[in-house]
Amino acid sequence: MAEIIDLHTKKREEQDRKAAVERSKRLEAVVQTFQCSRCAMKCMKCGSQVEPPASTPEDQSVPYRLCRSCREEYQEFLDRLHGRGDPACYWYNREWMEVWKAWMHYQDALTRYQLSEGFRRVIEEIKRR
């Protein structure tokens, strides 16, 4: 007599397999997002390729990996925060300042998430595979 197939077990196994594949895809997506957003070879603000970091004191004063253009804008942002800045650059207005503030908050949030227990567990889970 032929073997009897337990349809409930077979269905559960298929659901478990699909759930495992879906979870794996989601975990990979989370890790890939952070690998790309924190890539050492691109500007953290605009995404353009950057030169390897120089070891000059002025480069070490900027806490972000920025291309030359974004670094100049960041310096202008800092100057304007302290009441300085080039008044002839009218496009560096209140809204521009808000964009930089929001970007910096976003960078801080990414860092906090990378340091969170949940993110560390995801990394460990991927390493175990």
Image (spheres, rainbow, N blue to C red):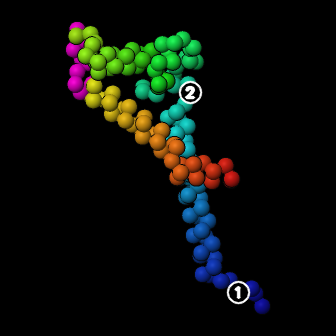
What residue does disc 1 label? 4
Viewer-side residue, 81 vs 128: 81
| Quarter of the image that includes the N terminus | bottom right
What segment is highlighted magenta in the picture? Answer: 88-96
Element marked by disc 1: loop
Q: Residue at x 37, y 20 (%)?
A: 74
Task: State the image coordinates of residue 11 (x, y, percent, origin top left).
Answer: 59, 76
Q: Image point 52% across, 39% down: which residue?
A: 34
Quarter location, residue 21: bottom right
Residue 65 visible, this angle: yes
Q: Amino acid at mark 1?
A: Ile
| Helix, strand or loop: magenta stretch | loop
Evaluate whether residue 48 shows in this view: no
Does 40 sit above or below residue 56?
Answer: below
Task: Residue under label 2, please give it.
Answer: 40
Instruction: Give the mark toward the camera: 1 or 2.
Output: 2
**Which of marks 2 and 1 precedes in the sequence?**
1
78 within the magenta span: no
Identity of the residue drawn at 57% across and 14% down: 55
Amino acid type, residue under disc 2 in the picture: Ala
**In the displayed structure image, the side of residue 94 where residue 22 appears, left or right:** right
